[in-house]
Amino acid sequence: MDRRKSLKSILLGGVASGLAVHGCKPNPNEAVTQEVVTASNYTYGRTPKEKELDEKLLKEVFFNQHEMESMSVLCDLILPANNDSGSATDAEVPNFIEFMAKDLPELQTPLRGGFMWLDHKSNTDYNVMFMSASEEQQKTILDTIAYPDPAVPAEEQPLEVQFFTLMRNLTLTGYYTTKMGIKDLGYKGNMPNVWDGIPEDVLAQHNVAYDDEWLAKCVDQSKRGIIAEWDENGNLLT
Amino acid sequence: MQIIESSQVYDVIIVGSGAGGGMATKILSEAGLKVAVVEAGPFFDPSDPEQMTQLKWPYESPRRGASTTRPFGDFDSAYGGWDIEGEPYTNTEDTDFKWFRSRMLGGRTNHWGRISLRFGPKDFKRKDQDGLGDNWPIGYDDVKPYYDKVDKLIGVFGTNEGLPNDPDGFFLPPPKPRLHELFYIKGAKKSNIPVYPSRMSMLTKKINNDRGVCFYCGQCSRACQVSADFSSGTCLIFPAQKNGGQIDLFVNCMVREVTTNDEGKATGVSYINKEDRKEYKLKGKVVVMGASACSTARILLNSKSSQHPNGLGNSSNIVGKYLHDSTGSSRVAFVPDMMNRKTYNEDGVGGMHVYTPWWLDNKKLDFARGYHTEMWGGMGMPSYGFGFNPNDFNKFFGLKVGGYGNDLRKDVKKYYGSVLGIAGRGESIPQKTNYCEIDNTKVDEYGIPILKFNYQWTDHEIKQVKHMHDTFEEIFHNIGAEPLGSKPGKEQDYGILKPGEIIHEVGTTRMGDNEKTSVVNKYQQLHDVDNVFIVDAGPFVSQADKNPTWTILALSWRTSDYIVEQLKQQNI
C-alpha cells in the first residue's frame, strides 16, 4: 500500500478499536518500499488479491519454445503486416496468447493439441514441421481449416477447424487491443471530449437525420459549465 | 475468542454504504448525528490512482479486459459479483437465483447503469389496476418531494414529457443520440413505439462546484474520477464528510447481526473485521439497514434472540418473502445500413442516450405488467472478445466466412460499429413463494449462516419476455437488420434471464400498514422494533418497470428525515 492508502486504512478501517489499528502496518514508509519491489508492469486499479493473481500468472510459463515459434508463424499468417500497420507478432500477440492460456486454462488443451495437429498434418503431407514448411505448404494446410461451414454450430465443427477459429479469434483480439491495432482500426475515443452529435457527412452517408424537435431538447454544450438552476416546474433556466 | 466491544455509543449505525446507506449517511450526519457506517468491502475512491480503471487502455491489462476476475471485465469497478469466494449461497431444487454483491464503499453504485427512473403514480398502486400483488401503503405524492430533491442534489439528465406514469422531474439536458440510436428511433417509430431521451444520472451540465461535468468517455461502469456520475461515495458520503459530518467508516467489516436488549430494542450490531477475522460489537441508538435487499434479510434472520426467536422484525414470517427481480432479455442484430463507418469519437455517456418507457395497455395483452427497452451499439473501445468471428456477417451477403491474411483487416473495419442490441427490463409480480431464507446447513468464511433461495418465474413474466422478443424483431425488421442467433422458444421460456441476473432484487422486507403481512411501516421502520429502519430495496412492495436506485435514494432520504424527527421528539 502507498502512504496515502495506508493512512486511509488506519483512519477508516481501524477506528473500531485499538486492536484493529494494531492489525494495520504501523510504519507507512516500510509499506512503500514493499510496494516498489512487487509492482508489476500493469497498473490498472487492481485489488491486492488481483495483483497477486496477475503476478503469479505472469511468472508461469505454459507454451514451450517450439509451440511459441509455431504460434508466431501461425499468428503472422493470420495477420501479416501491410503498408499501414505491423503484423500480429509486431504487436506481440503470442505473448498475449501465452497469458490467456494461463488465465483461461480451458484454452490450454485445444491450443496445445491444435499445434500438435498442425505438425502432424504438415509432417504427413510434407514431411516437415509446420513452422518450417514453405509458406505455400502452410497456406495449403490452412485452406482446409480456415473456412468453417456457417451452417454447422461452432462446437460441432471438426477439431482442426475449431482450433483455427480459436487462434484467429485470439490473434485478432490480441492485435486490436494493442496501441498498434487500435490505431489501425481507427478507434478515436477513450479521452476527454465533448459529444455534440453525429457529423453531418456521417448522417448523409447512412441516410438518417436528426429531428429538430429532439435536438432542441439536447444539451447546449456552450453552457455545460454553468450551474443548473430550474424554476419550480422543472424548467431549466441556465 | 472474545467479542470486542467499543464503548462509544453512536446515534445511528448504518449497515451498508450503497445508494440507501449513502443517502442515510448524508442526511443523518448533516442533521448533526454521530454516525457509524459499516461496509463489508474495502474503501473505494474512483479518483485514487491505485483503484482507478477509467481511461485505461485494453493493453494496460494482460488479459485485455477479459472477465476472468471481474464479472463485467477487468475495467468494471465492481469488487464482487454473482459468485464471491468464501461467501456462498444455495438454491432449492429447480431454482437458479443469482445473487450479485459488490463489496466496496459505495457498493453497486460504483458500476451501475445510472438509469434513474422515478416510479409513477400507477407503480405504487398496481393491485388497484390488475388485482395482482399488493399496493404500497404510500403513493407517488408521498415520494415526489424526495424525488425532486434527489434530482437536484445528485443530477439526472432527461426531459419533461408529461407522461402519465413516467413523471417529469428536474432534469439536466440530455446528450444528442448516436448513430445506432438514430437507427433504433427509426425502427421504433415505424411501429409507433415511442422513444424519448433517456434519464441517467450523469452531469451533462455543472450541478455544483464540487463535482466535475461529464467528459464523455462512456465508462461510467468504471466509476468516474471527476464524480460526474452518481455513486454513493463521491456524491453522498465524501461530501457529507467534507461538510463536517461526524462519520466513522468501518470498511472490510461484515455485519453478522443486529444486537438487542431485554426489551427487544436494538442496541447496535456485531460484525467481523475481515482484516483480523475477529468479531466486534458497536453500540447505537438507531440501526439503519442498507445492506441490500437480500443481505439485510439475511442479517435480520440471523439476529435471533429470546425476544425475537424468528429473527429480528420477523414476527410476521415475511422477512425474505416476496423477493423479486426485474425480468430481462435481449437480442442483437447486424444492421447493414450501419456498415463501412467513418470513425470518430462517439463514446458519449456510459449507456444509452435514448430509451422507450412502457407504452402499451396491459388490458389488451396476455400478461400483467410492462417493460422498458434499452439499447446499445457503436464504435466502442476494443477489449477481449473484439475481432472474434470477424466476418461472420459475410453469410448475409453469400460471401465466404473465415479465412486469414490482410483481408481480415478490411472485414473488421467494414463491420465495426454495425451492430445494434436491444434489451427489455420488465416488472415481475411479487410472489410470497419466491424467497430467501437461512440455510442452516452452510456457513460462509466468517462463520455466518448463508442464504438459500427459492424462486420461480410465473406465466406473466414469461409471456412478457415473449412480447419483448416480438418487439425486438419488429424494430430490427423495420430497419432492415438481421437478428443474430435464434429467437428463444417456449422450451427456453422465451429467453427470460435467471432471477437475480438483472441485479434489481427487491421486496424481501416489504412495506405495509398491516404488521402481519409486512415487515416495515410506511417510514421503513420495523413493525416489531421501532429503532431499526431499512433503506435498501427490501421494503419495495413492487418493482415497477423501472430501475430501483432513484426510488431507493428518495425513500432513504424520506426515512432519514423521519428518523431525525423521531429522535427530536424522543420517540425512539
Image (tube, coloured by chain):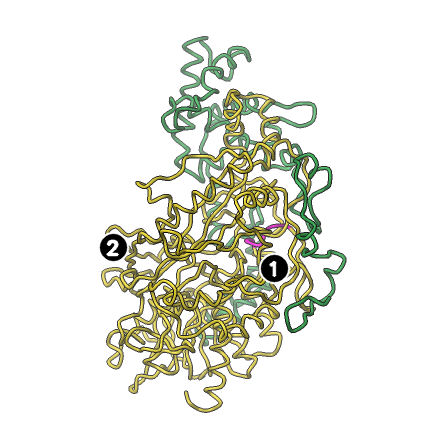
Q: Is residue B305 left or right of residue A42?
A: left
Mark 1, residue position: B158
From this view, report whether residue A227 is shown above or below residue B560: above
Assign the N terminus of chain B to one quadrant of the image: bottom left
The vertical placement of B389 against A35, above or below, is above
Give the color of chain B as drawn. Answer: yellow
The stretch drawn in magenta includes residue B220? yes
Crowding near the residue tagged with mark 1, few <14, some 14–19, many ≥20 C-alpha atoms within 10 Å: many
Is label 2 in a helix, a strand or a loop? loop
Query: B74 or B150: which is nearer to us?
Result: B150
Q: Position of residue A159 (x, y in %)?
A: 38, 23
> In x, y percent, where is residue B298?
33, 67
Q: Mark 1: which amino acid?
A: Gly
The answer to whether one can see residue A46 in this image is yes
Q: In 3D space, how far apart are the residues under numbered discs 1 and 2 (Cα atoms)?
A: 42 Å
Q: Earlier in the sequence, mark 1 or mark 2?
A: 2
Query: Which chain's residue wears label 1?
Result: B
Residue B47 visible, this angle:
no
Residue found 46% across the figure and 41% down from its top: B331
Q: Chain of mark 2?
A: B
Q: Which residue has dot 2 on it?
A: B92
Q: Position of residue A158 (x, y in %)?
A: 38, 21
